[in-house]
Image (spheres, rainbow, N blue to C red):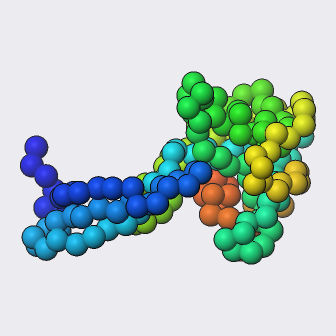
Amino acid sequence: MPADPLAWETLESDVAYTCPGFDIITQTVRLPDGERTDFDFLSEPPSVCILPFTNDGDVVCIEEWRQAVGRLNHGLPVGTTEPDDEDLETAARRELREETGHEATTIERLVTVEPANGLADSVMHFFVARGCAPTGEQQLDADESIRVAPQPYDDLLEAVRAGDVRDGRTVLAVSHYELRTTEAQ
C-alpha cells in the first residue's frame, strides 16, 4: 500500500534529553513538499487512567500537586505502565492501589486516546473500576503528593460540566463514561 501523501519521512532520530518518565526526541524529517526540517516531541510509556467507583457510587478521586501549572489538581488516578505489568489491566490495578490504597472488584476498558499527538507520542488507556474499597496504604513515588478525595459521581460530573475540573484526563474519562452510559440507555 503506498504511503499517504501527507506522511513525513523520518531521516534521523535521536534522544535529545532523557529523564525519569520521558524522553525528548529530535528528528530530521522530510515534509511532503520535499523540504527537510527538525521536529521535536516528548516520548513516554503508555499510561492508564482509572475512573474508580465504590459500591455506593462515589468516585475515588485524588488531589495532587502539579508543579507544571502551580496548583492542586483534582482528578483521577493516572500513571505510566511499568515493565513488570503483565498487561494494561494489571497496570490500572497497580496505579489505583498505589495512588489511593484502594482495590477494585472489576475493571473494564473504557477508551484509548492519544491526548496530545501533535507534541507527544503519549497513549492513554482509560478504565472503569467498580467495587473499589480501601485495602491498604498509598504507595506513592518520591515525587508524588496525593490526597485521596472520594466524592459522589454526580458532583464530579457537574464539576466537569462547569469547567471546575481542568485535568484533561479526568475530563476525557468522565466524558467517555457519559457517552457510553448514554449509548446504553
Q: Position of residue 123 (x, y in %)?
A: 49, 49
Determine the residue positioned at 68% across, 58% down: 170
In screen coordinates, is 20 left or right of 77? left
Foreground of the two, 119 or 67: 67
Q: Is residue 135 left or right of residue 39?
A: right
| Residue 150 visible in the shown view | yes
Q: How many badges with numbers are in the image?
A: 0
Q: Residue 169 falls in which quadrant of the image?
A: bottom right
- Where residue 85 appears, as percent x and y from the top left, is 60, 29
Q: Is residue 185 visible?
A: no
Which residue occupies 70% across, 33% down?
Answer: 93
**Which image quarter: residue 26?**
bottom left
Which of the pair 1/84 is nearer the observer?
Answer: 84
Q: Residue 157, how many percent across, how many down?
A: 75, 60
Q: Residue at x 90, y 32 (%)?
A: 136
For the N terminus, give its image quadrant: top left
Can you give x and y, in whole percent of width and height, for residue 146 in the image? 83, 54
Quadrant (top left, top right, bottom left, bottom right) of the C terminus = top right
**Residue lying at 39% horizontally and 56% vertically, measured from the top left:** 15
Decide if residue 151 is on the left or right side of residue 158: right
